[in-house]
Amino acid sequence: MNTYKRLDLKDREEISRGIWASESFASIARRINRPTSTVSREVNRNNKYKVQYFAINAQEKSDSKKSKGRRPKKLDTNEKLKEYVHNKLRNYQWSPEEIGKRVKLEYPQDTSMRISHETIYQHLYCLPRGELKKVLMQGLRQERKMRQPRKYAHYKRQRIQDIISISERPEEVKDRVVPGHWEGDLIVGKGHQSAIGTLVERTTRLTLLVPLKEKNALVVSSAMAKAFKRIPSKMKKSLTYDRGAEMSQHKLFTKESKIKVFFADPYSPWQRGTNENTNGLIRQYFPKGSDLSLVSLGQIREDSRPRKVLGFYTPSEKYYELTTGQKVALGT
């Protein structure tokens, strides 16, 4: 296998002679045993017109470029920023974009604490193999190599009686200006033997995680109604759910929680996009195949994770603002 070797002054002198003799790039390349593209790039890089190529000038330009070297990487020269990035990746599993936007909010006056998500990605992928890289890479959102089609086996189950379609849901739900409208679903564990209920408020993205001893409809409806008891009444207006059989006792849920349930159309996960996205984030902590009956819900920090859609504030911060009327102050 041939190894790459940079052009030297001797090669450039041969190129110069060939140009003045009106040789083709291919002919010159054969003589110095290089690809034709190498010769053409060299000539075009150093002169606008082929006949003006000078070997010594081209060599001096190349030497000057090499002597300058590459600019040191940002995280190699800013230890404070590097520590911040590593902490959020290692301990919170924030995405590079979340980190890049959040650090600006926390350090509004410190311009040295600025980094793009692309720089963080480059830093991660350039790390040598080892435990540090393994730990930090867990903060990346997508682990799979390509997108996979979603499966909706639960739609094949029994039909739910007295469904209220999403088409009858109030118009105020769509624009998210009025808080108190929720979306719900289950995250199912290994072998479909365990599950966690997820309830997400559409405006603030506040997430309620509901521990479930069983997945049957009576247990799910009662557990979710109980989860809403600690939520103020002004923040409880509606719940949009898919057509999973676990919500077949929706009337019981409404009776206990005073929240009306609307059902999304079959095979339409985008109608509950907020919940789908949140479930994807939670899956970072507990990948498919995890036994969710062993999970401590305190391990999931989803409401302390900055969200792009919230201007990189967290759901907890936005929920606090809405319920108290007080602005959350950062960077003070």
Image (spheres, grey):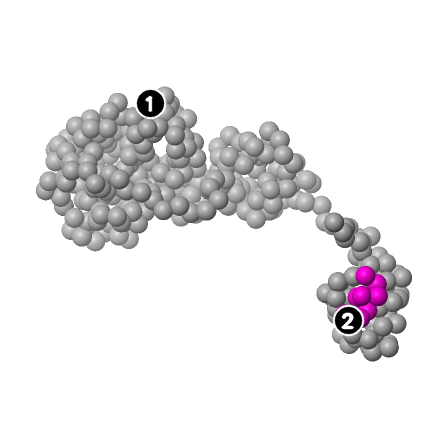
Q: Give the overall secondary structure of the magenta segment.
A: helix
First in residue order: circle 2 vs circle 1: 2
**Is 319 part of what is drawn in magenta?**
no
**Is 31 part of what is drawn in magenta?**
yes
Q: Tag 2, which secondary structure?
A: helix
Q: Are marks 2 and 1 in contact (CB under 8 Å)?
A: no
| Res 279 quadrant in image | top left
Towards the viewer: 235 or 24 = 24
Name the kind of residue labelled 2 in the image. Phe
Taking the spot 79% from the left edge, 66% from the top edge, the residue there is 29
Taking the spot 23% from the left edge, 51% from the top edge, the residue there is 172
Query: What separation in Å lies between label 2 and label 1 (alpha carbons)?
Result: 69 Å
Q: Give the residues drawn in magenta, as a range.
A: 25-33
Find residue 25 and name its label.
2
Towards the viewer: 5 or 296 = 5
Taking the spot 60% from the left edge, 29% from the top edge, the residue there is 131
Towards the viewer: 332 or 288 = 288
Pinpoint residue 236: horizontal percent, then vertical percent.
22, 38
Query: To which residue does mark 1 refer?
Result: 293
| Res 222 quadrant in image | top left
Q: Residues within 10 Å of mark 1 (few under 14, many from 20)?
A: some
Towards the viewer: 229 or 262 = 262
Pinpoint residue 58: horizontal percent, then vertical percent.
83, 65
Pinpoint residue 105: horizontal percent, then vertical percent.
50, 43
Q: Is residue 253 left or right of residue 4?
A: left
Taking the spot 59% from the left edge, 34% from the top edge, the residue there is 133
**Vertical placement of residue 109 versus 195, above or below:** below
